[in-house]
Amino acid sequence: MEQNLKCTIEEVINLLKEKYKSEGENALYADNDWHIYVADDELLLNSICCITAPPDFDEETDEEIIPEFAIENGMDGSVLPEILTLLTSL
């Protein structure tokens, strides 16, 4: 998945559907080098999100270190990509 991209949840689902159709289920699940951040707790199709690299974690505190692209776009709510990947393959 392309990183440092601002889009909607629906667009993410459509990108995943295309990958599923063109490359198959294995490719969909193998592509795990990305993460989603949103601005609010409500996750709707038209919710704006940021696709970034997976977060790092502080080894001492085990706290998530949010990527700069997400912070710059006001996104700090973390959404596991597996949720949308699972929905796409149903």
Image: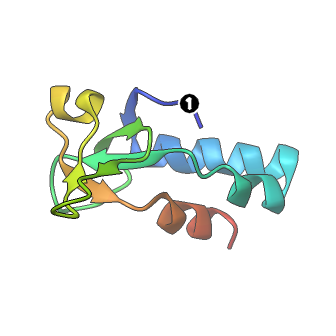
Q: Is residue 76 above or below residue 59?
A: above
Near mark 1 (Cα within 10 A), the count class, few <14, some 14-19 or many ≥20, is few
The percent position of residue 12, horizontal first and vertical second, equals 51, 44
**Camera-nearest residue between 29 and 64:** 64
Please identify the residue farthest to the right as the structure is shown: 23
Q: Name the amino acid type tagged 1.
A: Glu
**Camera-nearest residue between 33 and 46:** 33
Q: Is residue 43 above or below residue 75?
A: below
Residue located at (41% from left, 38% from top): 51
Q: Is 72 on the left or on the right of 51, as rendered?
A: left
The percent position of residue 57, horizontal first and vertical second, equals 29, 54
Q: Is 40 on the left or on the right of 56, as rendered?
A: left
**Camera-nearest residue between 47 and 67:** 67
The number of numbered badges drawn on the structure is 1
Q: Is 88 on the left or on the right of 48, as rendered?
A: right
Please identify the residue farthest to the bottom as the structure is shown: 90
Residue located at (29% from left, 60% from top): 43
Q: Is residue 70 visible?
A: yes
Quarter of the image that includes the N terminus: top right
Q: Is residue 3 above or below residue 85?
A: above
Residue located at (43% from left, 46% from top): 54
Q: Is residue 46 visible?
A: no
The percent position of residue 6, horizontal first and vertical second, equals 36, 29
**Camera-nearest residue between 18 and 73:** 73
Q: Quadrant location of residue 67?
A: top left
Residue on which the image places disc 1: 2
Residue at disc 1, secondary structure? loop
